[in-house]
Amino acid sequence: MKGSNYLEALSKTKEVVFDKTGTLTQGVFEVNGVHHNHLSEDKIIELAALAEIASSHPIGKSLQRAYGKELDRNRVTDIREISGNGVIAVVDGIEVHAGNAKLMRQFDIDFIECHQTGTIIHVALDGEYAGHIVISDVLKPTSKAAIANLKKAGVEKTVMLTGDASRVADQVAAELGIDQVYSELLPGDKVAKVEQLIGEKPAKDKLAFVGDGINDAPVLSRADIGIAMGAMGSDAAIEAADIVLMDDDPLKIAKAIRISKKCLRIVYQNIVLALGVKFACLLLGAIGLANMYVAIFADVGVMIIAVLNAIRCLMVKRL
C-alpha cells in the first residue's frame, strides 16, 4: 500500500471493478480449435501467428505458441494494429486480417459466428474469409473464492470489464458470481465505464479497480483506489496503482480490505481510549483526587496500551 490515505480509503470500498484478463484469469490463452477453415488448421494458425508477430498481447503470444516454430520476420510487412479489434499484415504477399468480429465488419468481410465459448480470432486472406481460431483463457483457481470473500468483507457490488465477446464474458461472470459485466470494450471504453460507475455510486463510498496490463494504467489512475497485479502486471500499471498485489492472488484484495478495516478500528479505539483517560484524569485533578501516579498513567500508560493494541494489526494474517 502506497500510503495511509489509501489504507483508509480501502476500508470504505463498496464496489470493486475487475479487468478480466490476467486479473480473474491467468492470462494464459490456449488454442482449442480451428473451424470453418478452407486451408489446413496448421496453415491458418501459421498465417495468424505471423500477422501477430509484433504483438505482445496474450492472445498473439498464444497463436505464436500454437504455431510452435520459429517465426520469420522477413515474411511479414505492413503490420497495422487496430486497437481492440485485431491486426492486419501482409504475409508472403497475402493480406491477412486476424481479429474479432468488429474487425471483419469494419472491412465488410462476411464471417461465420462460432458456436463455442471462447475468444474467437477470425482470419481473412485478401478479403476472403478463411475460418476462425478458438482461444480460451483459464480462470485463476482462487477467483471464485475471491469474489465470495469480497462480499463477506463488505463489498456490495462487483463488476467485470472486458474486451471479450458478451457470451464469453457472461459465462465467466456467472461462474464467478460477479454482479455486473460489461463486454466488448476498447481500452478507452473502460475509462469511460469506470467514470460512469463512479458517478453513480454514493459520494462517501469508494470504488476500487483491479487490473494488470499497460492499458489498465489510465483506469487505475482514475479509480478511487487502483489495485495492480504485481507479479504479472506491467510496470505502467504498477506505477499507476495505489495498492500492488505482489503474488497476483485476487484473494489478497479481500484480505487488504480486512486489514484496512481492522487498522481503522484500532486507530479509533486508541483515540477514544486516550481522550477518555485524559479527560477522566483532568476531571479527577479538578476535584483534587488525582496524584502524580494518575498523571503518569494518563501519559505513558495510555501510550503503552495504545501500542499494545496496535500490535493486533499483525493478527489479520490469521483471519
Image: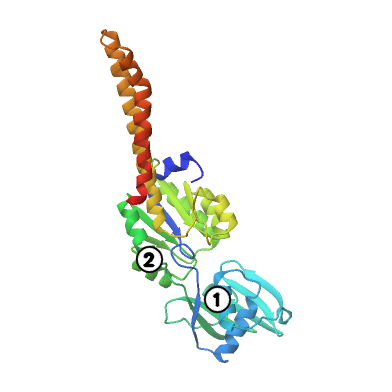
Does residue 175 lie above or below 311 as drawn? below
Q: Identify the residue at image location x=34%, y=30%.
A: 305
Q: Decide which of tag 1 and tag 2 comes sooner along the chain.
A: 1
Front-lying residue, 300 or 103: 300
Mark 1–mark 2 Cα distance, whole angstroms, equals 23 Å
Secondary structure found at label 1: helix
- Classify residue 200 as left or right of residue 233: left
Q: Residues within 10 Å of mark 2 (few under 14, many from 20)?
A: many
Q: Quadrant of residue 294?
A: top left
**Circle on res. 62:** 1
Toward the front, the furthest residue is 293
Secondary structure found at label 2: helix
Toward the right, the furthest residue is 74
Front-lying residue, 184 or 318: 318
- Classify residue 68 as left or right of residue 207: right
Q: Identify the residue at image location x=35%, y=33%.
A: 268
Q: Residues within 10 Å of mark 1 (few under 14, many from 20)?
A: many
Residue 258: x and y, percent?
36, 47
Q: Nearer the viewer, mark 1 or mark 2?
A: 1
Q: Identify the residue at image location x=39%, y=63%.
A: 143
Q: Quadrant of residue 8?
A: top left
Residue marked by disc 2: 173
